[in-house]
Amino acid sequence: MSRATTCSERVVGYDVVVLGAGLAGLVAAARAAEAGASVGIVALASGGLNLWSGLVSAQRSLFDAEGAEDSGRDSAGADRTEAGRPGRGPASGWTAAETAESARFFAAVTGRAGLPYLSASPASFTVLSPAGNPITCSMLPASAAAGDLTLWGGGQESGGGLLIAGFTELGDYPAGLISARAASRTGNRVIYRSFSLGAAVGRGLAPRLANLFDDRTWFRSFLDLSRRVLGPEARQAAAVAFPPVLGVYRFTQNLQDLAENLGCPVFELPALPPSVPGQRFWRLWRHHLERGGRTTFHLGSRVVEARVQGGKCLWVADWHRRYEGAAFVLATGGVAGGGLEVPPGSLLAQDDFPTAGAGSGRPENPREPVFGLATWGHGRDWLSWGVRTDSDLRPYPDGAATEPLGNVFAAGWQLGGANVSGAAGSIFTAWRAGGLAAAAAGATDGTIPAASTRTGERG
Amino acid sequence: MARRTRPGRPPVRRRTERRGIRWLTPADSVLDHADVIIVGGGATGVGLLWDLTLRGLDVILLEQGGLASGTSGAFHGLLHSGGRYAGSDPATAAECLTENHILRSVARPFVEDTGGVFVRLEEDDADWETRWLEGCRQAGLDARRLDRRDLLSREPALTQSLISAYAVPDASIDGFGLLWSLLWSSAEAGARVYFRARVSGFLTDEAGVRGVTVVGRDERDEAASEGCGGAPGRQGLPAPRTRAIEPGEITAPLVINATGPWAAETAALAGPGPAASVPVERDKGVMLVFNARLVSTVVNRLRPPADGDILVPHGPVTILGTTSGRTRLAGRPRPEPGETALLMREGRSLVPALELAPPLRTYAGVRPLLQKGRDTVSEGASGARKGRAPGHGPGRGEGRGFLLVDHGETDGLPGLLTVAGGKFTTFRAMAATTGDLVVRLLGRRARCRTAEVGVPRLVQGPASPGGGRPAGRAADLAGQLACECELVTLSTTLSLLDAGLDLADLRRLQRVGMGGCQGVFCSRRLAGALWQAGRPGTRAKPQPDEEAIAAELASFQRSRLAGVAPVEWGAQARFGALSRALARLTLGEPVEGERP
Ligand SMILES: Cc1cc2nc3c(=O)[nH]c(=O)nc-3n(C[C@H](O)[C@H](O)[C@H](O)COP(=O)(O)OP(=O)(O)OC[C@H]3O[C@@H](n4cnc5c(N)ncnc54)[C@H](O)[C@@H]3O)c2cc1C
Ligand SMILES: Cc1cc2nc3c(=O)[nH]c(=O)nc-3n(C[C@H](O)[C@H](O)[C@H](O)COP(=O)(O)OP(=O)(O)OC[C@H]3O[C@@H](n4cnc5c(N)ncnc54)[C@H](O)[C@@H]3O)c2cc1C
């Protein structure tokens, strides 16, 4: 097997080439690397991570039986779905045990990366959304854990209810509206206090404020300020919620200090994009993967070409370089992530659908897909659009093909059906795809669990 | 249906309402009185409000939605030079030309002098060019012939296959800004405006119409009338508020029906006779908005008026329109994919680059079209300038002159007038003719002043009476942007909200939500700001609670989605996917068209 080569070369090779560095790309890379493969990540940018609240939503997912059946009904009918099978979510028929396994893997890696997550499996957490609606998730960052409704809610006996702190410098965090909404939606006592971080701070988006919280000296003055402003009410409250800007790196420490300082549990609420928890994820996972030594990032690379021969992908290329691999993971995010293109005017004739590919196509002909894979989906709900695969996540080259590409595995929103799965679906499919790709590249060191040897298709 | 009041009961004459703009809720039952009631808050109604207020009359305007929530909020944005009608109807062309000149001078801040061109392509009929030129001559329109090469170097996006071209004084007009300023100037001068106030019937007695009954509406009613396809979108709406037991009653010696495409329905509230005297049909037109200024001048195709043959540069965008087709639909129509496809096809033959430019969204309006062959201009209007009689022929060939009916003359129902038809461009002339009739019927003497009095641009909104927001909070928001795409600040926005606008109005006035993000982010930011800023008790609109804000946000998003969906491809599709992800996953909000 080829091993990682230096980046100055025009042709580089890896066991596994991962296209895309969103949630799915990173998880797939981590899995393949842990299995012993050399991994090259080729991606334009960090994908949806910048927008992701950090919560792993426990929505109906593309791999639970009901969700799968639903997406089957939703997709426009059997004729547009995988040959011979009714229109099912790409991962229909997979077991809860496998799902739990992917969650365990995720929790372990993200803990090692310095971004601990808590898992509620098989139950779920209920937290407040940035609109004040209660939403459920199966995993959440430890920094958000005290926000679980059962901890601060629970009716009148706990008395104190929730105190939501807002910063006037942070325009897109309407603490007042969130608290009003949360109070009416949960039936709990929810109050808010908005205060200014000081004239010197100035207005800014969340990432700018987060950098400020990484400054220890500044943070000490913030502790004093918050005690003065929130102190009396915080002592009454069951918990205090802050905007998710308490540092890009120092957030764990900061949260601890704040809790001690205020004398009650504190946590971060999710917020509108740009989202600091997503950015933490991107930075910490990237450091972690690079430190591991098996993964190389090629960022700012738009894949514009792929060579497929004999049912296998040989290489993909961006403007500068060719990336050879024994196996490929396609994690370019579907229509939302830029991995699927909806051609101009395709809606005008209603039976035109997205062109599949690992990107928006070749420059000389923007409509020509890179891979030209078969797609499936449902109406104008672009989140449900994805490439059509067999149950091992291998995409079919076109509508008529009966054989999927042998060494390409799709993951995350590239699979579509994402309307019913949040991050959980991406994590699960990426975990699978990473493992299958490593196995296909012959790079496994025997650590691939049973999932990849599962036989028989259900559905 | 007309409601008869008990004989002998004195007319309600109470002045319970403050002057200014007020938003009704279903719980409101207003009593008010004025010299004249105008029903309909589009260009026609607001123009008339301004005209009559300048004449010193005490006027009340009633509109079932917000300002220009009908056709006047969904038109092409073109201040016609008359060129469009020169070939088929030189008299209408002449009328447009006159109004074009007047509005350029009195409404200067709202008119962008883009100029316009008519271009004939290879495939277009050359005889029509001759006929058109003759029409221009008759209308007094100086269509200057342009050198083909000069024009192409000035407008490189135009097709190479153009044969001949002429310059005309077309312009683009900020319709919503103009109407808003007219409305405010009138309110400052004493006029009263009720929004979300639907006229449900007429009050009559032996002497004829003496007022109207009014019901307040809420977001739910508005969503229903938007024609947004029923159930799914309504999940987010709050439970209906308590409704007033009695509708409100507003009385006046004269009621004017200015409900545009809905004029016949409104007249029908007074009986079948009045309805029959208002031969107005609804004609749907669709427009496509492109995210760039593809041309710098209005481009018309020199052929008999047809689909997709005008491009209007409007602010940072270009609007391609329009289509034409009868509709019976009562609410706001929605563009259909077939219609946008037709526009794309036709538009491309004028500007081939349309193929590559991403359309931002699409919208539709309904024209108040006069039925052919009916000469119904009221004979009672002697002494007043008459609206012109409709022309003949189907579709666009029909007259665009307007209709002014004195139902006292036509149906033996004095006290009710209907004014309908026309164009945005001619709203001032329509108001002038109607105003002359109004003062004559009321026995007053006051001449029309709208051709002389300039209209100031009121973007900030006037100072709110009796104090504003608490100072500290206003300061908090100073300098924050409400909309990054269009660089609108939150404080400007809030002062407009204070003055009684809602999010949908802001979209039209300040273009919030019309930039690249199409309102995905800014609408949520505004909702937060709305709540945070609180609303002073003096404010015209009812104090919003969390539910009301949610409903307003939902309706804003719904209308945005309706406009974007038919043109979602390329970058727009990607944005659509992201905004759905945001709503579903991050916010936990229901998404249009999705099962809960
Ligand atoms: C607005 C938003 C809100 C969200 N909120 C939640 C939530 O509340 N709960 C939850 O569970 N999940 C949420 N998610 C997260 C979501 O689950 C993940 O983003 C999703 O799983 C998609 O991940 P992905 O890696 O498949 O795709 P993406 O994150 O879109 O990544 C695609 C990658 O492919 C790259 N790419 C695309 N084309 C090319 C090309 N031609 N060449 C090279 N690289 C290319 C991109 O640069 C990017 O790196 C949210 C996502 C978004 C966008
Ligand atoms: C697609 C299209 C493009 C156009 N482009 C141009 C152009 O570029 N230039 C131009 O000059 N003209 C244009 N026009 C024509 C122009 O827009 C219309 O003629 C003009 O806006 C009509 O104004 P209006 O006030 O009569 O009607 P509207 O604006 O429709 O106003 C009527 C109002 O009455 C209200 N109403 C109805 N029933 C009731 C009730 N019972 N109680 C209370 N209120 C009620 C409605 O809510 C509505 O707001 C275009 C028209 C269309 C359809």
Image: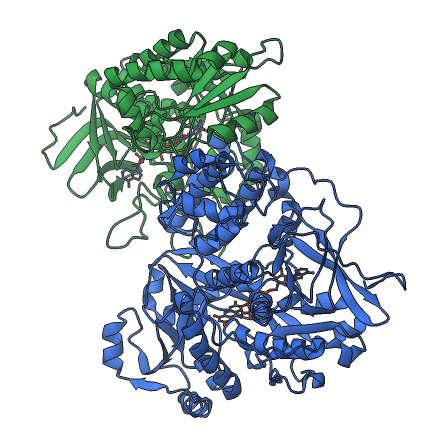
Relative placement, left or right, of B109 versus B265 is: left
Regarding residue A447, the answer to whether it shows in the image is no
Instruction: State the image coordinates of residue B155 (x, y, percent, origin top left).
Output: 28, 71
Q: Colour of chain A?
A: green
Relative placement, left or right, of B205 versus A189 is: right
> What colour scheme was applied to this rendering of the protein?
by chain
Total count of labels? 0
Residue B309 sits above or below residue B391 on the image? above
The quarter of the picture where the N terminus of chain B appears is bottom right
Q: Colour of chain B?
A: blue
Instruction: State the image coordinates of residue A48 (x, y, percent, origin top left).
Output: 36, 33
Instruction: State the image coordinates of residue A456 (x, y, percent, origin top left).
Output: 48, 24
Q: Which image quarter: residue B208?
A: bottom right
Regarding residue B424, the answer to whether it shows in the image is yes
Foreground residue among B151 and A169: A169
Instruction: State the image coordinates of residue B361 (x, y, percent, origin top left).
Output: 45, 55
Q: Residue furthest left?
A: A8
The quarter of the picture where the C terminus of chain B appears is top right
